[in-house]
């Protein structure tokens, strides 16, 4: 495990990552989490891990629903920012998801494509093993919210330019060697720096093979944030709800 050379270790800690994704649809995200909490019958005081929590916006919302939340993320900058929101039932910790967890939870959320980052399949499988071991008991659940790769590739916008906060983002997307790759050139004052995002092409059969290897049971599959049925051709998301 070499986080110093992993693309996400450098990109997620930059201010440009947060500028580019600043205006994501948080209303949609909150609706998703409200739907999940209701569907899973989570109760006030249940312990929830928001794994790969970023700056903590979604942890904060989950906490507002009465849940006892820990947000965990690899990015020190994100955790430092999120800590301004901490309270008696909301905590933030810097954590690499490949490292085993010490606490047990009623639910573990891995939201908004925070999986499939690693070159080695064994590392993705280790993440799932850690999630399994972090579940309190057989009634506990984990939610893995991944993109539907077939839909994503079919609808890939190959080139686009976005200008935000005096930064120009020249973005190219492609399918390469089993990864959906986003190359992001950031130009500020005529100086250019290039970053990458690489998400492994994990379709449902591949994800099921991962789950089988660690002994996680697939309970439900949804295709969008309204929790509609998964449709291989038309669903934008692949949302897996699993248990021990």
Image (tube, rainbow, N blue to C red):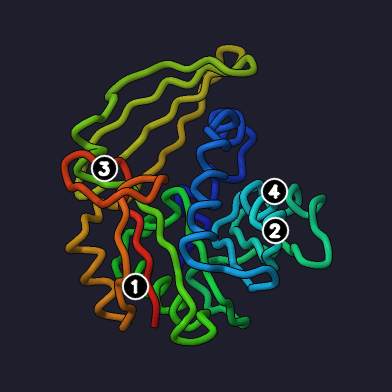
The residue that mark 1 highlights is 125
Residue beneath the point at 60% across and 31% down: 22
Q: Which of 168 and 235 lies nearest the eye of the viewer? A: 235
Q: Secondary structure at mark 4?
A: helix
Tell me the quadrant of the picture where the C terminus can be found: bottom left
SS type, badge 3: loop
Going from the N terminus, do you reach mark 4 or mark 3 first? 4
* Quadrant in the rendering for residue 26: top right
Residue drawn at x 74%, y 64% is: 91
Q: Nearer the viewer, residue 112 or 45?
A: 45
66 relative to 38 in the view: left or right: right
Count how many numbered circles sit on residues in the image.
Answer: 4
Tags 4 and 2 in contact by the CB under 8 Å rule? Answer: no
Q: Residue furthest bottom?
A: 137
Spatial separation of the CA atoms under disc 2 and disc 3? 29 Å
Counting residues from the start of the chain, the first of labels 4 and 2 encountered is: 2
- Residue ID for mark 4: 77
Q: Earlier in the sequence, mark 2 or mark 3?
A: 2
Q: Residue 203: x and y, percent?
A: 21, 55
- In x, y percent, where is residue 124? 36, 67
Which residue is more in the foreground, 217 or 126?
A: 217
Up the image or down, 37 lies above or below 19; here it is below
What residue would you read off at disc 3?
Answer: 235
Residue 17 is situated, as x and y percent measured from the top left of the image, at 56, 36
């Amino acid at each position: 495990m070499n986080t110093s050379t992993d693309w996400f270790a450098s990109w997620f800690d930059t201010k440009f990552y947060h500028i580019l994704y600043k205006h994501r649809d948080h209303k949609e995200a909150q609706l998703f989490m409200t739907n999940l909490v209701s569907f899973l019958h989570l109760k006030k005081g249940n312990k929830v891990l928001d794994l790969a929590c970023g700056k903590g916006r979604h942890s904060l919302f989950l906490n507002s629903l009465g849940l006892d939340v820990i947000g965990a993320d690899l990015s020190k900058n994100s955790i430092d920012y999120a800590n301004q929101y901490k309270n008696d039932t909301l905590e933030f910790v810097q954590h690499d998801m490949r490292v085993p967890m010490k606490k047990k939870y009623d639910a573990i959320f891995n939201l908004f494509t925070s999986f499939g980052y690693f070159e080695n399949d064994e590392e993705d499988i280790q993440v799932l093993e850690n999630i399994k071991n972090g579940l309190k008991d057989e009634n506990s659940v984990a939610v893995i919210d991944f993109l539907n790769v077939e839909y994503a590739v079919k609808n890939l916008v190959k080139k686009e330019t976005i200008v935000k906060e005096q930064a120009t983002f020249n973005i190219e997307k492609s399918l390469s060697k089993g990864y959906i790759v986003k190359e992001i050139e950031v130009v500020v004052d005529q100086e250019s720096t290039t970053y990458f995002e690489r998400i492994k092409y994990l379709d449902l059969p591949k994800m099921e093979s991962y789950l089988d290897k660690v002994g996680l049971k697939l309970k439900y599959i949804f295709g969008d944030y309204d929790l509609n049925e998964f449709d291989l051709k038309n669903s934008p998301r692949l949302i897996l709800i699993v248990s021990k």
